Amino acid sequence: MSAPLVIDGKRDGVMQAGDIAVGVPTVTVTDPVAKAVRMMAVGRLPGLIVVDEQSRPTAVLPGSQVLRLAIPGSFQEDPMLARTVDEASADSFWRELGNLTVGDCLPRQPLRPATVAPDATLLEIAALMARLRSPLVAVVGADGVLLGAITLERLLTSLAVTGPGEPPPV
């Protein structure tokens, strides 16, 4: 069996995770939830990556899960309770998070973060995103350290630019 052809760092000219990964801001378990929500909103991110002290992803949270961090549990459990809150208070609920941290809001049994190696193919990334319902995937090195991230938008753009039977852009 012959070794794969490598063209411009791509195996057989195929685009890989390392080719489309971009740097994204990250949060830690000690960061306030309000900061995480602001970071996601200002950066127009589809989610957030939670990292440890060595920049290794511990969680990849889709935007809906980040929003869930900001909503008091009582309102999540009983939607009718949310209807009893006046409009002014309903619009500012997330500002009342106080000292709540990202770590305070993570599930007790965290799921394995959505990660791929830099040599993962676009199909592998798409399959992972679909399986985990995550619009964000962390790209990690062999040591587990975050190298970058791939958003759903970036993946779809890469797939659209490189249509079936077409060589990847140079």
Image (cartoon, rainbow, N blue to C red):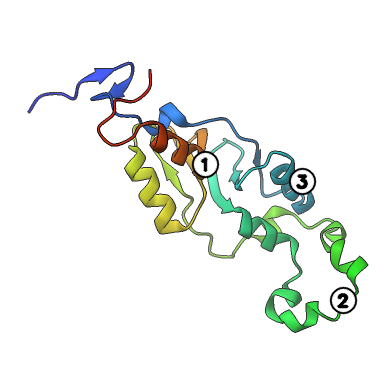
Foreground: disc 2 or disc 3: 2
Quadrant in which residue 104 is drawn? bottom right
For the C terminus, the quadrant is top left
x, y percentage for residue 152? Answer: 50, 44
Q: Indicate left or right for 19 with 105 as reference.
A: left
x, y percentage for residue 85? Answer: 87, 76
Name the residue type under label 1. Answer: Glu
Question: Which badge, 2 or 3, is on the more N-terminal residue?
Answer: 3
Pointers 1 and 3 in contact (C-beta within 8 Å)? no
Residue nearest the observer in this picture, 77 or 109: 77
Name the residue type under label 2. Answer: Val
Name the residue type under label 3. Answer: Arg
Residue sitting at the far left? 1
In this view, 96 is above or below 136: below
Residue named by callout 1: 153
For the N terminus, the quadrant is top left
Residue named by callout 3: 38
Q: Residue at x 72, y 82 (%)?
A: 78
Residue named by callout 2: 85
- Per the image, label 3 sits on a secondary structure element best described as helix
Distance Cα–Cα, label 1 vs label 2: 35 Å
Q: Indicate left or right for 119 with 141 as reference.
A: left
Distance Cα–Cα, label 1 vs label 3: 20 Å
